[in-house]
Amino acid sequence: MTLSTTQALLTIGVVAVGTLLTRSLTFVLFSIGKTTPKFVKYLGEVLPFGMIGMLVIYCIRHVSLQFAPFGLPELIAGVFVAIVHKWKHNILLSIGGGTVLYMFLLQMVFYGTL
């Protein structure tokens, strides 16, 4: 089943308008009042830490400690990210460097598929 050009354009338009509304609605709602509600400030303080924790758990959910390499690439890359971020306070450097290190460890050290 294929979409006609009109259907595709309508779908793109609806998605674009929906995205624009959901992104701008919060700014419109909170620009009416002069102060940001305390609940929104609280969420702004606690949600980043919660999201990072969920991402870490999501990333290591399939790591097996029973079979080689026993989670070593993930552990090494995770420690690298923590150390570089503590040292440089640069998110791009720590996450990017950790990703490059993790892929290097997988491809060249532990599995050697290259």
Image: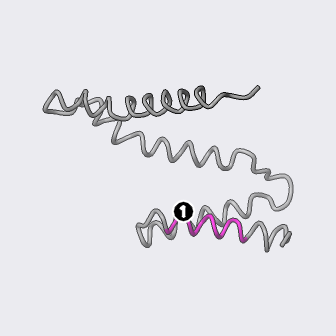
Label 1 residue SS: helix
Going by the picture, which residue comes out furthest to the left? 34
Residue 111, placed above or below residue 33: below
Asked if residue 43 lies in the magenta stretch, the reply is: no
- Region rendered in magenta: 93-104
Q: Position of residue 29 (x, y in %)?
A: 25, 27
Residue 47 lies left or right of residue 61; in this view the side is: left
- Which residue corresponds to the image point at 44% horizontal and 45% vertical from the top-left? 49
- Which residue corresponds to the image point at 13% horizontal and 32% vertical from the top-left? 34
- Dividing the image into 4 quarters, which one contains the N terminus? top right
Residue 56 lies left or right of residue 66; in this view the side is: left
Amino acid type, residue under disc 1 in the picture: Ile
- Dividing the image into 4 quarters, which one contains the C terminus? bottom right
User: Would you call the spot at circle 1 few (<14 residues within 10 Å), some (14-19), or many (20 or more)?
Assistant: some
Q: Position of residue 54 (x, y in %)?
A: 56, 42
Residue 84, placed above or below residue 23: below
Q: In the rendered image, which residue does mark 1 sit on?
A: 95
Q: Position of residue 70 (x, y in %)?
A: 79, 58
Return the residue nearer the eye: 7 or 30.
Answer: 7
